[in-house]
Image (spheres, rainbow, N blue to C red):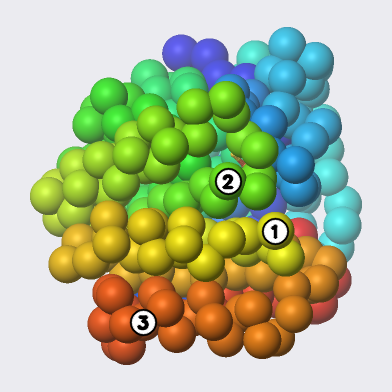
Amino acid sequence: MRVIMAEVFNSWQGEGGSVPGSAFGRRQIFVRFAGCDLHCLWCDSREYIDASRVSRWRYEVEPFTGRFEYKPNPASVDEVVDALLKLDTGDIHSISYTGGEPTLQVKPLKALMERMKELGFDNFLETHGGLPELIKEIAPLTDYASVDIKDESANATEDWKGLVLREVESIRILKEAGAKTYAKLVVTNETRVENVRWYASLLKGLAPLVIQPREPIEVFQARLMEFYREAARIVGRKNVSLSFQVHKYMNVL
Ligand code: SF4
């Protein structure tokens, strides 16, 4: 089975705040898939969005050395498993499947998740959540999930409200399958507080919410406090957290 990969590396999870399901500060091996069907304004994986242009993938030879080797795409699932196992530093919390959007290649994603479970690892899914019908296929293999709630200001798609409703459906499917799941909302100065209230009302009783200011941080503190307070008022004060992309400050992948 073949998969269009972007990269495999070992690092710390820099996001997720302190809600249940977060792996913030945990060591993970990251498997970044190429390809995404959205077009968020602030995407930081832009070079991997069009999978047809990702002609090769890279894997770290040794953690934190910055040394990579390259292989042509598509990769075989066996090649990816080999690259993963070479990066097992013995302190791995879970394998993070990220992107791009990993669920777009659900068959190889599922095969990888199955293999890593057999080998004794937990699976952590990072997804935009817009494809609940594909989420269903891998939900039983998912131990942890970070599912985006795309803010209107991301400009990710024409049908923004439909996307948010599908993301919430994905969260429901993952939760029902037993995955520890939280929702991640990236906010900007253009984020509207009434939208934050809407997201929170959809998540109430379902999943905790992390609010992450877009990098580089420009959201005014007063706005951030308002978003946080309004979300906490609706989902409950123990179910909301700020999240920052700490790996960027540490200058690691
Ligand atoms: S969903 Fe993620 S990978 Fe896709 S365009 Fe948005 S930020 Fe980029």
Residue of label 3: 232
Q: Position of residue 238 (x, y in %)?
A: 30, 87
* Badge 1 or badge 2: first in the primary sequence: 2
Q: Amino acid at mark 3?
A: Ala
Image: 235 above or below 182? below
Q: Check disc 2 and report the residue beneath it.
A: 152
Q: Quadrant of ligand 1?
A: top right
Q: Hey, what amino acid is under mark 2? A: Glu
Q: Is residue 132 left or right of residue 153?
A: left
- Residue 148 as seen in the image, left or right of residue 107: right
Q: Which mark sits nearer the N-terminus, 1 or 3?
A: 1
Tell me which residue sits at (28%, 62%) in the image: 201
Residue 229 visible to the viewer: yes
Q: Is residue 4 left or right of residue 108?
A: right
Task: Say which element carries label 2.
Answer: helix
Going from the N terminus, do you reach mark 3 or mark 2 first? 2
Determine the residue positioned at 27% across, 82% down: 236
Q: Secondary structure at mark 3?
A: helix
Q: In the rendered structure, are the residues bearing label 1 and label 2 in contact, judged by CB atoms less than 8 Å apart?
A: yes
Marks 1 and 3 in Cβ contact (< 8 Å): no
- Which residue lies most toward the front here? 194
Residue 190: mark: 1
**Amino acid under disc 1:** Glu
Q: Residue at x 25, y 40 (%)?
A: 169
Residue 251 screen position, x and y as percent:
84, 71
Distance CA(mark 3)–CA(mark 2): 20 Å
